[in-house]
Image (cartoon, rainbow, N blue to C red):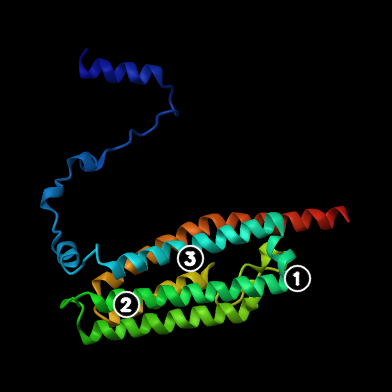
Amino acid sequence: MSHSDAASEREDNNPAGNHRPELLDCCGGLNNVDYSKMDLTLIEELLRHMKCHDFSFCVAAIAIIFNPLFWNVVARWEHRTRGLSRIFGSPYLACYFLGFVIILLNICRSHSITVAMKAQDRWELMDRTEISYIGVVFLVLGTVLVVSSFLALGFTGTFLGDYFGILMDEKVTGFPFNITENPMYWGSTANYLGLALMGASPVGLVLTALVAVAYKVAIHFEGPFTEQIYQERSQRRKHE
């Protein structure tokens, strides 16, 4: 069949007004990209300054992954069974207990990350005054987000009080929640990024990325579950 015949047949099978533009495969798609020509110098340099099998690095990575896993598992167990509330005789005391445990775990995580950064080499490429100043900016920004988030939510609002039945009257929408939906998590991530930049630490960058991934996964589970808790309260109020 010639090209003109094929075109004529397509026109006959598609009435006027129903023509849909064909999707163009730009540059033949990613299959035609020659990855061997990519400049991986920075990544190679970063990996050269890292020792992934170093004990302190492994401890820090475990702490980063464990912390959000721990508080999500415990909080969901509490929501389902009210086990901690029964042990302490009050949902508020139980929430305070979990909150202090989370604070201690986060202190241990921060310490393990600091130890891992000091145990490995600095990166000459990052060891510059301007990068150190950028790190200070991230550290200040992260601290502002964390502190303002805590002040807006209070202790129980910050440390999973919703799972203990301690619900807020309405959703907090003021600063810093008008900037980001999870300022506590991203503020904490910014703090670690700032420390990594100030310390010219490539391992600090990798651990910061792991913190961001761990928080992203936590948000994926916490967000819908928290919404479900408040939806259940709304339904109970409708039936009252």
Does residue 167 appear in this view? no
At label 1, the amino acid type is Ser
Pointer 1 and pointer 3: residues touching (CB < 8 Å)?
no
Q: Position of residue 203 (x, y in %)?
A: 26, 70
Q: Position of residue 100 (x, y in %)?
A: 58, 76
| Relative side of 92 to 14, left or right | right
Which quarter of the figure has residue 222? bottom right
Q: Is residue 13 above or below residue 230?
A: above
Q: Which residue carries the number 3 mark?
A: 67
| Secondary structure type for disc 3 | helix
Q: Residues within 10 Å of mark 3 (few under 14, many from 20)?
A: some
| Relative side of 156 to 113, left or right | right
Q: Which of the two discs, 2 and 3, labels the residue nearer the N terminus? A: 3
Q: Which of the two discs, 1 and 2, labels the residue nearer the N terminus? A: 1
* Residue at figure coordinates x 46%, y 60% from the top left: 216
Pointer 2 and pointer 3: residues touching (CB < 8 Å)?
no
Does residue 53 appear in this view? yes
Q: Which residue carries the number 1 mark?
A: 90
Q: Which residue carries the number 2 mark?
A: 115
Which quarter of the figure has residue 72? bottom right
Give the CA separation, mark 2 to mark 3: 17 Å
